[in-house]
Image: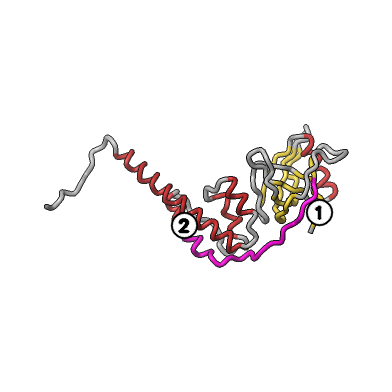
């Protein structure tokens, strides 16, 4: 499905179903948000990575105007709706301050994946090393999107995840990431333990020859 959206490029990845709070201060985006509120329409956040837009982004719905400041700034609450591919980009839209463009909404794949238990095992291992409690619900639809920001993915990896339609494939993508990053963190913890021991008396069991 094709549609035209006002666009708010950001150096971040927003996912469908994700809640995102934004502080709006630039005049062009204050105009964009005010129009979305008045006309009850959505806007798009195309990913902006390495000073360019690679082509995909997320349609966002404003769920609440949390605060409006005297100088026109706003705090808004938004939620991701779906993923789009950018077809064209007009900056600014004629007669407006903000950018816009035509987008193609990408079909959503299966939201329940087949590898969630394996993913949770790797997630628990990582959070054990970080000494942080695991507080995720693996039965949530699109579970990979719920944890992607919280396992050390780069912006480029978060973007790649956004472009994968099927939840099972996204889970496998994150499992491979955790397989790479967890041993690195484990080595860091071992190194920190050795640093803490340096300069202190060390107790060793006598070797039995």
Which of the two labelled residues, at mark 1 and mark 2, occupies the earlier sequence position?
1
Give x and y (percent) for residue 24: 73, 38
Direction bottom: furthest residue: 114
Farthest right residue in view = 95
Residue 46, image x, y percentages: 71, 46
Badge 2 crowding class, 10 Å Cα cut-off, few under 14, some 14 to 19, many 20 or more, is some
Residue pictured at 40% horizontal, 49% vertical: 186
Q: How many marks?
A: 2
Q: Which mark, by number, is residue 124?
A: 2
Q: Secondary structure at mark 1?
A: strand
Of 154 and 85, nearer the camera is 85
- In this picture, residue 147 sits left or right of residue 189: right
Looking at the image, residue 19 sits to the left or right of residue 28; the answer is: left
Q: State how far apart marks 1 and 2 are (Cα).
A: 41 Å
Q: Residue at x 51, y 58 (%)?
A: 175
What residue is disc 1 on?
3
Q: Position of residue 84 (x, y in %)?
A: 72, 53
Q: Nearer the viewer, mark 1 or mark 2?
A: 1
């Amino acid at each position: 499905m094709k549609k035209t959206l006002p666009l708010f490029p950001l150096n971040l990845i927003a996912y469908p179903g994700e809640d995102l709070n934004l502080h709006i201060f630039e005049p062009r985006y204050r105009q964009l948000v005010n129009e979305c509120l008045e006309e009850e329409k959505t806007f798009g956040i195309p990913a902006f990575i390495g000073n360019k837009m690679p082509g995909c982004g997320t349609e966002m719905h404003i769920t609440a105007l949390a605060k409006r400041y005297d100088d026109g700034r706003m705090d808004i609450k938004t939620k991701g709706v779906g993923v789009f591919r950018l077809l064209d980009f007009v900056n600014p839209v004629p007669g407006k301050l903000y950018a816009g463009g035509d987008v193609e909404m990408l079909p959503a794949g299966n939201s329940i994946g087949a590898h969630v238990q394996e993913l949770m095992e790797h997630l628990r291992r990582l959070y054990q090393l970080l000494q942080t409690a695991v507080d995720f619900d693996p039965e949530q639809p699109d579970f990979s999107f719920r944890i992607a920001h919280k396992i050390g993915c780069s912006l480029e990896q978060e973007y790649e995840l956004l472009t994968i339609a099927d939840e099972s494939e996204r889970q496998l993508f994150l499992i491979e990431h955790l397989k790479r990053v967890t041993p690195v963190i484990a080595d860091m913890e071992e190194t920190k333990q050795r640093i803490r021991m340096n300069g202190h008396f060390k107790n060793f069991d006598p070797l039995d020859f």
